[in-house]
């Protein structure tokens, strides 16, 4: 005679219903394990999603070309290389900056060697679209202003020089570059993909040549290509930029560098996942312990059920179901706690909450598995009791 | 209905609880098995109820030799042919009276809906129709034992085995429970009552007296 699934479930929940506090406490162990597991997978997943969103907003189709340093002096890029890059088919935008090696100061009263760690770069007037940069206040260099002593500050450079923003209607501030005064006409917003620009003071390409003795060799070429052709463009760039010495040209993809930096933050994940496994194991032992005690306490009930016609198999099924129900209860509670904690933390960090489906499925599946493993021994013990032994218990 | 032929039960260690007992219970009988404690009457009840197997001799229930059955078939036989009433009632705490009675049908393969209907009918039969939704801790001792009797009757077993059914009750309640058993006997239920109480045994139509694991004598009224 077989029991229906509903009857089995009913039997399995009977012990939990009559001993609620004990059931809740032993399910708590499982809940903590599952919650930990979901949190340690959900939080890095949310962080990765936030990074992916950020990267796709910043653009992953940007490339950066630099000369490789040989000895102590880098091999300069040819002055005509920027236009040559622009002639590669899939390249949509190209621009360049060049280091002038000049020193910038807030005023000429400051020590001429103290440049506040800032770099003065000659910039082409088409730089902004090529690096997805945006102006914070004022304006960028144009064909009209690039030949005059005007400067645009990177966001960090502006902070160090003491100008957070330009106020319309007041006289434009001035900075001293080399021995000349330059008028600040704009301040950039932070550019996460090209952090070196944040710490730079940008001056016009022509002005740098005329006023700062700059030789016209670009230091860094920034370009954007069609998304699908990024790797192809990357492959031909060295030979295009410096046909004589292609080996001395370094091409990098700023979005990769940002992704790699974030990836290192996620490596703690494995450690915490191990921790979650340990707490799940401890929870499982708790369930097994509860079940063993439950079988000892309920010997009379077992004897009665045997007298009422329950076979050994049916007794086994009853206690195994109880153990699985106990763990599944913990698993469900743990999943709820884990999801809530992940969503809460992600919201706090302004990340899009991501909970991997495999973590939720694995959490509940793992809880059920723990319930089975923990329940097998007590269930077999219960079924091995002979009816007379069980009934003789007082 | 139930036939024991030369049944012995020896426990490991050499204690002989039953020694060459032969007993036949016919359909419609109401038998008292009476004897002092240690006389082997509980062992006899366990063997009659297939809760224990004899070390020698045969037990036949409805013509079937119990020793030849697997655990599953033996359990099914208990679930369909036998009903048990225990001194300590053995009601399940978390269940209502009706649910406790319905448990008597669970292992007989009766569908859930029918179980409820038949449990209500059985409770009505023992005079507890008004206590259906009560839990065991809300019932008096006599009521508990009547719930247990309803559970033993609900699947209409061929034989009801009662182990000291009045042992945990005061004499007035015990008498009421005994009256219920006598009434059920009139309605043609086959019942075997184990008791150490000679007064109770004297009120039943057939008495089997036991001493030291043997049947000492038998009286029919």
Image: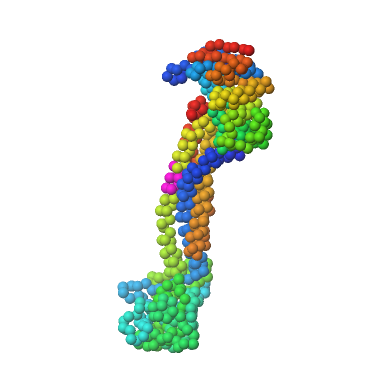
x and y, in percent, of residue A32 in the image: 46, 50
Q: Is residue A185 left or right of residue A105?
A: right
Quadrant in which residue B67 is drawn: top right
Q: Give the residue displayed 44% in from the left and 52% down from the top.
A: A273
* Placement of B114 over or under A74, stated as above or below: above
A285 or B125, which is in the foreground? B125
Q: Give the residue displayed 63% in from the left and 23% down from the top.
A: B179
Q: Is residue A55 magenta?
A: no
Q: Give the residue displayed 49% in from the left and 57% down from the top.
A: A342
x and y, in percent, of residue B85 in the image: 58, 26
Magenta stretch secondary structure, dominant: helix
Q: Look at the image and name its color scheme.
A: rainbow
* Placement of B149 over or under A290, stated as above or below: above
Quadrant in which residue B83 is drawn: top right
A232 or A286, which is in the foreground? A286
A182 or A245, which is in the foreground? A182
Quadrant in which residue B142 is drawn: top right
x and y, in percent, of residue B45 in the image: 55, 21
Q: Give the residue displayed 41% in from the left and 74% down from the top.
A: A196
B22 or A118, which is in the foreground? B22
Q: Is residue A262 left or right of residue B170?
A: left
In the image, the segment drawn in magenta is A278-285
């Amino acid at each position: 005679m077989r029991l229906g699934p509903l009857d089995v479930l009913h039997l399995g929940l009977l012990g939990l219903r009559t001993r609620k506090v004990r059931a809740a406490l032993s399910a708590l162990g499982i809940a903590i394990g599952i919650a930990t597991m979901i949190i340690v997978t959900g939080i890095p997943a949310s962080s990765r999603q936030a990074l992916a969103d950020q990267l796709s907003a910043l653009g992953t189709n940007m490339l950066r070309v630099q000369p490789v340093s040989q000895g102590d002096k880098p091999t300069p890029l040819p002055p005509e290389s920027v236009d040559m890059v622009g002639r590669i088919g899939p390249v949509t935008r190209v621009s360049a900056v060049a280091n002038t090696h000049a020193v910038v100061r807030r005023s000429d009263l400051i020590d001429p060697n103290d440049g506040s760690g800032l770099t003065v770069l000659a910039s082409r007037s088409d730089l902004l679209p090529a690096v997805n940069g945006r102006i914070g206040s004022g304006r960028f260099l144009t064909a009209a202003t690039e030949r005059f002593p005007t400067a645009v500050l990177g966001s960090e450079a502006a902070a160090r020089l003491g100008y957070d923003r330009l106020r319309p209607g007041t006289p434009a501030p001035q900075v001293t570059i080399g021995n000349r005064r330059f008028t600040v006409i704009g301040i950039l917003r932070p550019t996460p993909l090209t952090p070196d620009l944040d710490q730079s003071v940008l001056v016009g390409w022509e002005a740098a040549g005329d006023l700062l003795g700059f030789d016209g060799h670009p230091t860094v070429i920034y370009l954007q290509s069609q998304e699908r052709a990024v790797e192809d463009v990357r492959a031909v760039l060295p030979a295009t930029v410096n046909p004589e010495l292609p080996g001395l040209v370094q091409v990098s993809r700023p979005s990769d560098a940002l992704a790699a930096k974030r990836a290192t933050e996620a490596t703690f994940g494995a450690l915490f996942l191990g921790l979650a496994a340990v707490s799940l194991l401890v929870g499982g032992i708790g369930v097994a312990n509860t079940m063993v005690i439950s079988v000892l306490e309920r010997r009379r009930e077992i004897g009665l059920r045997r007298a009422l016609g329950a076979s050994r198999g049916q007794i086994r099924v009853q206690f195994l179901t109880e153990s699985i129900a106990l763990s599944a209860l913990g698993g469900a509670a743990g999943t709820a706690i884990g999801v809530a904690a992940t969503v809460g933390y992600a919201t706090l960090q302004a990340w899009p909450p991501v909970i991997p489906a495999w973590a939720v499925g694995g959490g509940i599946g793992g809880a059920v598995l723990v319930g089975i493993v923990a329940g097998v021994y007590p269930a077999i013990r219960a079924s091995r009791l002979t009816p007379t032994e069980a009934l003789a218990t007082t | 209905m139930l036939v024991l032929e030369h049944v012995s039960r020896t426990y490991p260690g050499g204690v002989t609880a039953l020694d060459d007992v032969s007993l036949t219970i016919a359909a419609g009988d109401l038998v008292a098995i009476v004897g002092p404690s240690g006389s082997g009457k509980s062992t006899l009840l366990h063997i009659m109820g297939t809760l224990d197997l004899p070390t020698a001799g045969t037990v036949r229930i409805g013509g079937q030799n119990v020793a030849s059955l697997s655990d599953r078939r033996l359990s099914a036989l208990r679930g369909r042919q036998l009903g048990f009433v225990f001194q300590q009632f053995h009601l399940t705490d978390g269940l209502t009276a009706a649910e406790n009675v319905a448990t008597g049908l669970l292992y007989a393969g009766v569908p859930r809906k029918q179980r409820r209907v038949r449990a209500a009918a059985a409770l009505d039969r023992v005079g507890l129709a008004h206590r259906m939704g009560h839990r065991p801790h809300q019932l008096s001792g006599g009521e508990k034992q009547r719930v247990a009797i309803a559970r033993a009757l609900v699947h209409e077993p061929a034989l009801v085995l009662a182990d000291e059914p009045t042992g945990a009750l005061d004499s007035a309640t015990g008498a009421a429970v005994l009256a219920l058993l006598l009434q059920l006997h009139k309605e043609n239920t086959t019942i075997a009552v184990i008791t150490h109480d000679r007064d109770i045994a004297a009120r039943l139509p057939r008495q089997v007296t036991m001493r030291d694991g043997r049947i000492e004598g038998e009286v029919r009224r």
